[in-house]
Image (cartoon, rainbow, N blue to C red):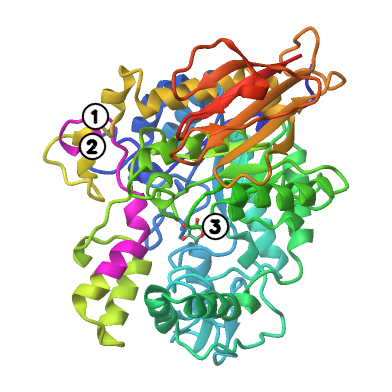
Amino acid sequence: MTNLKWWQTALFYQIYPRSFADGNGDGIGDFIGMTAKLDYLKDLGVDAIWLSPHFPSPNWDWGYDVSDYCNVAPEYGTLDDFKLFLDETHQRGMRLILDLVLNHTSNEHAWFLESKSSRDNPKADWYVWADTPPNNWQSCFDGSAWTYVPERGQYYYHYFMKQQPDLNWRNPQVKQAMWDAVRFWLDLGVDGFRLDALGTIYEDPDLTPHDVPLTMVELRRLSDTAKTPAETRLRDKYWRDMFKHQWGGPGLHDLMKELRAILDEYEGDRMLVGEDDDIAYMGDGNDELQLVFNFPLMRTRQITPPHIRKNQKERLSQLDALPVRGWPCNTLGNHDCSRLHTAFGDRIHDAELARLNAALVLTLRGTPFFYNGEEIGMTDLLITDPSKLRDTMATWYYDQAVNELSVDAAEAADHAARMTRDKNRTPMQWSAAPNGGFSPLNVETWLPVHPNHAEGINVKDQKDNPASLLNYYKRLIHVRKSTPALVEGEYTPLAVRSQEYFAFLRTLGPSTAPLHGSAQGGQTVLVVLNYSDQRQAMKLKVSGFKTARVLFSSSGRSKADEALASLTVGAFEVLIAELKP
Ligand code: GLC
C-alpha cells in the first residue's frame, strides 16, 4: 500500500467562513451554515477543508486580527457549533485545518490591552515597542508601521494595519502563550494549520530603513498607474525594496521546528501549510512545514504552457533537492487575490480557460487547493461605491488617494474596486434565488451577492446540468482520485517547445507501491491542456507506448483507445489518457 500521508493525497478546499453559508439568516456565514454544506463538499470530492479565521475579531481585517485565539467569533456561532462542525467533517472522512495568525494579534486582544497599558506591566514586552519610530518602515496596509500609544508614550510596530500589532516573538512567554492556543485546537482534534504571513514574524534586527522615495499611498498609486515595462519594473522593485527589511529575519526556522515538534507529538499526521512560496520553510523536508504554496504559478497575468513548464522545472528541482524530498502544493486562488475565473481569463474564452486551469491544478504533481466558489465559476465583483467596501486596505487607499494625493474621486473609486479583496470574497452562490440562496430574501448580506448568481453561476442550477462547471470539477476530481499516477506519479514534460499546449506525463513506476493496490502497479498517464483556440496535432512519441486510452476529455470524445502518434486535441481541450504499449 501507499506510504503517502493524507495531506499528500487530499484535495483541499478553502472556506472563507463569512461568505460560505449563512445558517441563521443574518447576512453572515456561520458554523450552522457550514455544517449543513458538508455533504456538498463531500459530494464534490473534497478531502480536507482549510478554514479561514473563525476566531473572535473586531474585523478590521476580517478575522486576521484575532482578539481571542481559543474561541469562536460570536457571529459564526459557539465553540460547541465548532465542535459539531469538526465532528461532522471527520465523520464524513474529511479533515479540517485552521488558519493560524502568528505574526500579530488584534489591538483589542487582552495581551495587547495589557501591553499598551504601561511600560512595566507583565506583558510590557509582548509586542514591539520603541520610544520614537526607529526607521521609515511602512505598514503594507495603512502608512507608517509605527503607531503611537499615549498610555506608554511609545510607538508599536505593525507590518499590517495599526489594528494588527506585531507580537514580539523573541519573548519566550509569547511563544508559550501561542503554543498553548495551538494545543487547544490540536486537543480538540483539528488536523493542522495554514500559517498566515509567516515571513513577517521576524524583522531585520538592525532595523535598516528602506530607500524607496515614495510613501505607501504613492506606491499604491504607482501600482495603479504604471503602464510601460520600465514603470512596472520600477513598481515591482519599489514593492520589494520597501518591505525587504521587514521580512524573513533570523529565527523563523527554529520557530517552525518548534511548532512542528508540537504537531508531531499528536497522532494523525497533523500538518502545516505556509502562506509562502519559500521552500526553505520546509526545512530539511521533514522538520518544518509539510507544504508551502507554489505561488509563482499564479503570479502571472496569463497562464501559458511556457509559464507552467518553467514554473514546474524550477519548483520541482528545488523540492527534489531537499534532504527529504519535498511535496508540491498548487493553487490558483484564495481570499487575497482575484478569482481564478477573472484573473486568468482573456474576456473572450474565460470559461474555457477556467476549465483548463482547474485541470492544471488537479493534474500537476502535488496537493491541490481550491478556493470556495471557483467550482461554479464565481467571478470578481467590482464594488464601485466606496461606502460599500469592507476591506480596510481599500478604504484606506481610497481616502488617502482622494485627500492626500488629490486623485479624482471617481478614479480612486475605480482603483479601490479593483484592488480591494472584497471583490473575491462575496457570498457563495447557492441558487438563483434573491441573495443567491446565501441569505434569505431582504436580508442585507455583509458583502453584496454577485448578480451573476441569477445567470447560472450558482450551485443549484449547475448541480443537475451535466455540462456545468460544477459537474466538470466533480468528474475531474473523480478521475484524479481513481488514477494513482495523477496523485503520486512523477512529472515529465513533453513537446517542450509548444506555445499552444502543455503536455506531460505522470508516471508511476512498477516499483512504486500503487495507491489503490492495483495488481501490476505501474501506470503512465498523459495529460494535455490545449490553451489555444486551434486544434493541435501533437505527434507525441513516448518510448514503449503506442496507445492512449482516454480517461477524460473536456470535449466529450469517446473513451476509446487512440493511436498516440496521431493524437490531436481540439481547441481548449483537456485530455487525460492512460498510455498502453
Ligand atoms: C495574510 C492573509 C490576509 C491578511 C494578512 C494579515 O496574508 O491571507 O488576508 O490580511 O495575512 O493577517
Check disc 3 and give the amino acid type. Arg
**Left or right of 356 in this view: 77:** left
Other residues around mark 3 within 10 Å, as few (<14) / some (14–19) / many (≥20): few
Q: Nearer the viewer, residue 33 or 571?
A: 571
Which quadrant of the view contains residue 291? top right
Would you name the residue on which mark 1 appears?
A: 431
Q: Which residues are magenta?
A: 414-439
**Under tag 3, what secondary structure?**
loop
Q: Residue tagged by mark 2?
A: 453
**Mark 2 CB near ligand 1 (8 Å cut):** no
Task: Indicate the amino acid at tag 2.
Answer: His
Question: Where in the figure is residue 535, as x and y percent of width and height?
Answer: 48, 33
Query: Which residue was labeled with disc 3?
Result: 299
- Whichever of labels 3 and 1 marks the residue nearer the N terminus, that label is 3
Q: Is residue 77 left or right of residue 170?
A: left
Q: Between residues 388 and 184, which one lies in front from this camera angle?
A: 388
Q: Quadrant of the C terminus?
A: top right
The residue under label 1 is which amino acid type? Ser
Neighbours of disc 1 within 10 Å: few (<14), some (14-19), many (20+)? many
- Residue 437, magenta (yes or no): yes
Residue 164 shows in this picture: yes
